[in-house]
Each structure stands twice: as C-alpha cells, then as structure tokens.
Amino acid sequence: MVTQSKVLVVDDQEEIRLLILATLDADNIDLFEADSGEEGWRLVQNLRPALVLLDVMMPGALDGYQVCRQIKTDPILKNATKVILLTGRSSASDIELGKEAGCDAYLIKPFSPIELLDLVERFVPSM
C-alpha cells in the first residue's frame, strides 16, 4: 500500500535536495532524500512513496531515466507512485526519453519554487 504523504527527493546535488525539501516542508507530508539512483530505487521499494522527484543526471549505475523506468514497470508501484523528473536537460529528445521512461511530469532546472509546488500539488492533493 502506498502512503499518500510520502515524497522522495533523489538528486546528487545536496543544495538542490535542500531547496526542494524546504519548498515542500509541510506537516502532512513525510519527506525523504537520496543522493543516487541506486539509493533512490532502494528507498522507493521500501517506502513506496506517493511521489518521487527524480534528477536525471546522477553518478553511478542508475540514472533518473532508469529509476523512473523501474518504478513504472513495477507491478506494485507503477500506478501508485508518480514520478516528476527534475533536470537541466531540456532538449526535445531528453523530454521524449522521460516520456518513454514513463514519467508523470518533466520539470526543467532551474525551476521556481511556486512552479514546483503547483506540480507537486497535482500529484499529492493533501499538500
């Protein structure tokens, strides 16, 4: 069962994670963070969050596209966990890769905190 109040932020840049966590800080939401695709995927499997904010370019074996694809092909997670890809990659081909991976939304860095909140509220109505 997915808990509607869990949000996972996966980004290798600590400053970005802190900005997102501060932007989304609310009493009715449990925020979690990971600094790599591998750690993010492990946490997604354990936490089963309602939403994952996922950077595309990360060091290690799994990038954001791969983590997104794993979430969206998992029988338990695919319909219950929404994925917003957050990335500096803004070309049409990058956005198409995100769609192919199954992301629910694609947000290009730099983004405004208001833009992020509006998008998150679409997927986590209790915010």
Image: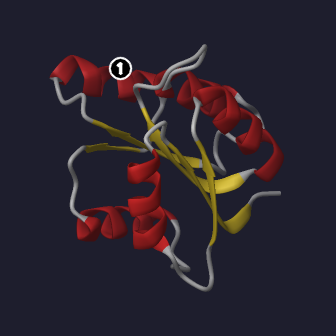
Colouring used for the render: secondary structure
Residue closest to the eye, 123 or 64: 64
- Which residue extends farthest bottom? 27
Number of numbered discs on residues? 1
Left or right side of 65 for 3: right
Instruction: Name the quadrant of the N terminus.
Output: bottom right
Q: Is residue 113 above or below residue 40?
A: below
Determine the residue positioned at 40% across, 25% down.
Answer: 57
Q: Amino acid at mark 1?
A: Leu
Q: Secondary structure at mark 1?
A: helix
For residue 41, which quarter of the picture?
A: top right
Residue furthest left as drawn:
91
Query: What residue is drawn where x is 68% and y is 55%?
Result: 49
Q: Quadrant of residue 18?
A: bottom left
49 left or right, relative to 121: right
In front: 103, or 28?
28
User: Could you tell me residue 48's position as x and y percent?
Assistant: 75, 50
Q: Which residue is mark 1?
A: 97
Residue depicted at 59% across the width and 29% down the height: 37
Rendered view: 41 above or below 17: above
Label 1 CA crowd tier, 10 Å (few <14, some 14–19, many 20+)? few
Query: Image check: 123 left or right of 73?
Result: left
Q: Residue at x 38, y 61 (%)?
A: 19
Q: Give coordinates of residue 66: x percent, y percent.
A: 55, 20
Q: Is the residue 35 above or below the residue 96 in the image?
A: below
Considering every residue shown, the one lying at the far top of the view is: 61
x and y percentages locating residue 42 in the rendered image: 76, 35
